[in-house]
C-alpha cells in the first residue's frame, strides 16, 4: 500500500458538501496558515484532507495536535510512503473525498472568511440551473498578501466558458492566478496529469477538462496568495528541469489534440514549439507523440521560428 491513514478527528457536526484537499511536502512552517484560515470560515461545511507527500519535517506531529482539538470540521491525514509530487498527492486525496465538491487548498495559502459560504450558495445556484451538468468548476479571483489582485479579472461576471472561449479563440488567456472549486466526480474522472520525473502544472489538467465541460468564472476574490521562496513557482530550476516541465506540459496538451487544431490555434502552436525545443534536451521513452503529430509540430515550429526570432531581436534593440 502506497499510503496509510494516520489520524482522523471525529469532533464535528454532520457535513456533506465540500472536501478541501491540501497536498503538502515539508511545509509545516506554512501549513498552520491554512489551518487558521479554515478555522475562520463562516461556514464549516467541509472536511479537510491533508495528503503528506512523505515529508521529513514535523508535519505529522503538527497535524496530530490539530486532530485532538474540538473542531467543527473533520481532519483526515494521509502519509505517503514516497515523495512523488503534488499532482500524485492530489490524485490520492481525491480517492478519500466523500463530498460532491472539492476545493484544492495549497499548503501556504489562505482564504477570505466567507469563501466556503460563497461556494455553497454558488453551487446550489448552479445545480438548479438548466445547464448544471455542463459546469464542472467555479473559478474565482486571487489577491496577494498586500491585498492586490493577482492578474486580471474575467472579461465578464458569471462567465460560463469552454476551452475555445477561455483560451483558443482569444488573443491571450486571462492573466494571473485563479482559484477553483470542482465537482469531485469530474476530478476523479480526469485525474491530475503527473510524472515521477518532473513537475506538471495543474493547468494542463484544467484545460483537458475544459474541452468537455464549461467553467463558471466569477469576479469575486476568495484565495489569498503568498509568495513562498520554497514554492513550486519561485523555486529556482536548472535548464534541464525547465525543459522537462515543457516536455510534459506540451505532451499532455498535444497528445489528444487533433492535428488540424495545432495548425489553427496559437495556443497549440506554442506548445508544439515548446515540445520540439524540449526534445532536443530531454525525452521520456514512455511518452511519445505520433510521428504524424511530431511532423505537424515541426511544421508549426519552422513557420513560427522567424516570427519568434524577429520578436526577440526587437526586444533586444529596445533595450
Image: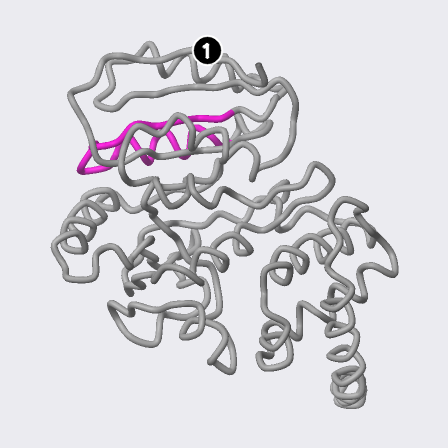
Q: Is residue 215 above or below residue 201?
A: below
| Lateral position of residue 178 relative to residue 41, left or right | right
Residue 165 vs 200, above or below: the answer is below
Residue pointed to by mark 1: 6
Q: Nearer the viewer, residue 111 or 211?
A: 211
Viewport quadrant of the C terminus: bottom right
Q: Image check: 252 left or right of 309?
A: left
Q: Is residue 203 magenta?
A: no
In this view, the residue farthest toward the left is 128
Position of residue 54 measured from the top left corner of the image (x, y, whole percent): 61, 21
Q: Quadrant of the N terminus?
A: top right
Write down the quadrant of residue 38 in the picture.
Answer: top left
How many numbered marks, from 0 up? Answer: 1
Q: Which residue lies at the image location 33% right of the left edge and 44% below the top edge?
A: 111
Residue 142 appears in which quarter of the rendering? bottom left
Q: Residue at x 24, y 67 (%)?
A: 158
In the image, taking residue 293 as reference, residue 96 lies left or right, namely left
Q: Name the residue: 65% across, 31% down.
A: 84
Amino acid at each position: 500500500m502506497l499510503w496509510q491513514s494516520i489520524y482522523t478527528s471525529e469532533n464535528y457536526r454532520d457535513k456533506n458538501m465540500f472536501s478541501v484537499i491540501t497536498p503538502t511536502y515539508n511545509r509545516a512552517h506554512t501549513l498552520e496558515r491554512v489551518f487558521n484560515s479554515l478555522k475562520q470560515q463562516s461556514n464549516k461545511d467541509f472536511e479537510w484532507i491533508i495528503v503528506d507527500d512523505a515529508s521529513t519535517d514535523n508535519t505529522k506531529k503538527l497535524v496530530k495536535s490539530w486532530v485532538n482539538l474540538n473542531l467543527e470540521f473533520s481532519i483526515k491525514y494521509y502519509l505517503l510512503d514516497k515523495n512523488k509530487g503534488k499532482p500524485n498527492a492530489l490524485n490520492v486525496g481525491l480517492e478519500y473525498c466523500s463530498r460532491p465538491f472539492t476545493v484544492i487548498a495549497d499548503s501556504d495559502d489562505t482564504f477570505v472568511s466567507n469563501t466556503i459560504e460563497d461556494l455553497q450558495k454558488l453551487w446550489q445556484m448552479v445545480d438548479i440551473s438548466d445547464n448544471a451538468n455542463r459546469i464542472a468548476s467555479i473559478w474565482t479571483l486571487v489577491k496577494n498578501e498586500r491585498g492586490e489582485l493577482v492578474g486580471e479579472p474575467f472579461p465578464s461576471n458569471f462567465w460560463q466558458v469552454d476551452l475555445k472561449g477561455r483560451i483558443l479563440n482569444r488573443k491571450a488567456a486571462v492573466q494571473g492566478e485563479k482559484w477553483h472549486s470542482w465537482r469531485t466526480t469530474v476530478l476523479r474522472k480526469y485525474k491530475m496529469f503527473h510524472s515521477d520525473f518532473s513537475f506538471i502544472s495543474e493547468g494542463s489538467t484544467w484545460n483537458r477538462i475544459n474541452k468537455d465541460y464549461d467553467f463558471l468564472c466569477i469576479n469575486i476574490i476568495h484565495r489569498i496568495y503568498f509568495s513562498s521562496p520554497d514554492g513550486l513557482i519561485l523555486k529556482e530550476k536548472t535548464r534541464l528541469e525547465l525543459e522537462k516541465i515543457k516536455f510534459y506540459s506540451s505532451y499532455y496538451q498535444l497528445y489528444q489534440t487533433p492535428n488540424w487544431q495545432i495548425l489553427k490555434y496559437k495556443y497549440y502552436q506554442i506548445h508544439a514549439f515548446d515540445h520540439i525545443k524540449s526534445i532536443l534536451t530531454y525525452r521520456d521513452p514512455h511518452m511519445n507523440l505520433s510521428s504524424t503529430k511530431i511532423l505537424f509540430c515541426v511544421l508549426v515550429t519552422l513557420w513560427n521560428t522567424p516570427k519568434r526570432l524577429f520578436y526577440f531581436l526587437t526586444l533586444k534593440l529596445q533595450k
